[in-house]
Image (cartoon, rainbow, N blue to C red):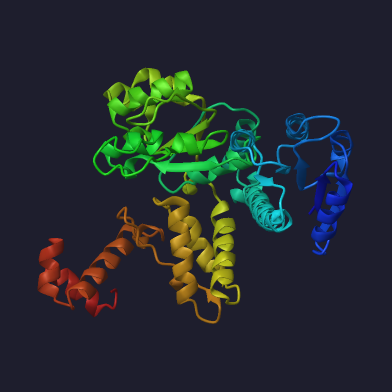
Amino acid sequence: MNPFRIFIVEDDEFYGEMLKHHLSKNPDYEVELYLTGKECVANLHKKPSVISLDFTLPDTTGYEVMKKIREYDQDISIIIVSGQEEIATAVKLLKEGAYDYLEKNDETKDRLWNSLIKIKENIGLKQEISILKEEIGKKYKIDKAIKGKSQPIKGIFDLIEKAAKSNITVSLSGETGTGKELAARAIHYNSSRSKKPFIAINVSAVPRELIESELFGHEKGSFTGAQTRKLGKFEIANKGTLFLDEIAEMDINMQTKLLRVLQEREFSRVGGHEIIKIDVRLIVATNKDLSEEVHKGNLREDLYYRLLGLPIEMPPLRHRGDDIIVLAKYFLEEYAKENKVDLPSISSGASEKLLKYPYPGNVRELKAIIELAAVLANDNIITESDISFNSAHGTSDFLIEEDTLQGYERKIIKFYLQKYNNNVLHVAKKLDIGKSTIYRMLKGNEI
């Protein structure tokens, strides 16, 4: 972190020394006094945090010095100190970027002290935000954001890297749970826009009548319930990245408005007339085939070509081989950290069972399976019996273990007997088989 350095630019040397002495009481401040604007500008390489600038100087005007400071570094806070109170001048200077305007009087040194406290707090917050952004950026480094070493995922790494080097629109496709938003964030945080906002919105989660306001914002009173002006996601994401998830669910009329914004790079808020220019990188995602949606009439063809850009199809987990175990171990590490427990291990039997399952819910489903297994495990070892597949897609672990037709038949009958409290007649009726078949299996301890 840079020191909190303060320049006092004051042609009245006695007054300047008084301000310097007063501010130097704070040991965190490094205070330097300059008697002319030229001296101040010549020393900007010392990177002051704040400049207290006398508006009337012998060699130049406060306007000129402020202009040169702004050209050198926009982040330097400027406090104007003037011998007289001029409201019009103060307003103009504040509009042009001055942090504060102080009139020279008995209260100046105290008001300056208070302004510096606020500026230092703001700089501290900005530095904290900058550090957090750096940490997020590290988290989303391509090989850290997406776990895996399989060939399909290596291909995704290559495409993400190419996408990050340009501003091309990216269209992410793939089944639910394959990590489309994770890929979008990796593209953003590895691009030149990484310091700017990443804004995500799920189109299908926003009611049709509110999506325009959500994307483009609205003015106060533009419709019932619009109590204040609201900025839309495009405006908030300016200079950064806007991620539109489930883009195929967008209403056809809204598609027309989105197309115009993408073409013109400008829009107006709902109920407003102000033209707002934007510079936004767009990434869209869908679990549908967009070309098929065009053929069905659900997606405008001209919008389709605008959105296609660089297509990236996220592979389903079942096609990623040993990445399943890589991800399982990663989720276990995260579980252990969050719950402050020892890291569980995965037995060979459990690993085999995990590798055989098709994962209709993909990575998201694997995470749920692993977390449950960690809870059920005894002696901190996840065994085969701890792995439970209860997919919402209707897939169970019934077909995971390969068996003969006769073996599957025994499993089915045993399952139904357990389900219906060993009522043989009821199970025979349910399965449309003879009750003698069930009795024979029971007698021979086959089930």
Quadrant of the rendered image containing residue 218: top left
Left or right? Give the position of 12 relative to 265. Answer: right
Quadrant of the rendered image containing residue 446: bottom left
The answer to whether one can see residue 172 in this image is no
Quadrant of the rendered image containing residue 193: top right
Q: Quadrant of the N terminus?
A: bottom right
Q: Looking at the image, which residue is at 57% across and 40% down?
A: 152
> Where residue 96 sits: x, y (%)?
63, 33
The answer to whether residue 269 is above or below residue 367 is above
The tally of labels here is: 0
Q: Looking at the image, which residue is at 82% across and 64% down?
A: 25
The answer to whether residue 218 is above or below residue 79 is above
Relative to the observer, which residue lies in front, 185 or 35?
35
Relative to the observer, which residue lies in front, 51 or 109?
109
Q: Looking at the image, which residue is at 85% across and 53% down?
A: 31
Q: In the displayed image of the protein, which residue is found farthest to the bottom?
A: 379
Relative to the observer, which residue lies in front, 287 or 113?
113
Q: Looking at the image, which residue is at 55% across and 43% down?
A: 185
> Where residue 427 sits: x, y (%)?
15, 69
Left or right? Give the position of 412 relative to 123. Answer: left
Q: Quadrant of the C terminus?
A: bottom left
The answer to whether residue 313 is above or below residue 341 is above
> Where residue 341 sits: x, y (%)?
57, 77
> Where residue 359 sits: x, y (%)?
42, 53
The answer to whether one can see residue 227 in this image is yes
